[in-house]
Amino acid sequence: MAPNYLDNDLVITTKLALFNVNDVVVLKTNLDGNVLKRIKSIENNTYEVEGDNKSYHSKKNLNIPTEL
């Protein structure tokens, strides 16, 4: 998520059920563990997220239930 978040930055999180475009979220992945991503769009329970680092391709589409 560089340049906004750097290695060893402290990020404090909370569990929320309401997400908005431009929110930063933590995703647990099998490959990389916990990663930070920014919500780019929300349509029909599909969240498009990507990292802030434009030199690294990290765009993903996720289906997330509306009730957690």
Image: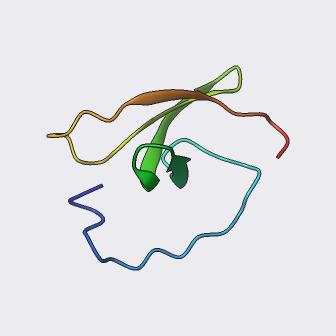
Residue in view at x 33 percent, y 77 percent: 9
- Is 64 placed left or right of 29 in the picture? right
User: Extreme left residue here?
Assistant: 55
Q: How many marks?
A: 0
Camera-side residue of 17 and 63: 63
Residue in view at x 29 percent, y 48 percent: 52
Coloring scheme of the render? rainbow
User: Extreme top residue here?
Assistant: 44
Residue in view at x 30 percent, y 65 percent: 5
> Which image quarter is the N terminus in?
bottom left
User: Extreme front residue here?
Assistant: 30
Residue 22 vs 57, above or below: the answer is below
Camera-side residue of 32 and 27: 32
- Is 52 placed left or right of 65 in the picture? left
User: Extreme right residue here?
Assistant: 67
Residue 68 vs 9, above or below: the answer is above
Q: Percent from the top left, x then y, of residue 25?
A: 53, 53
Q: Percent from the top left, x then y, of residue 3?
A: 20, 60
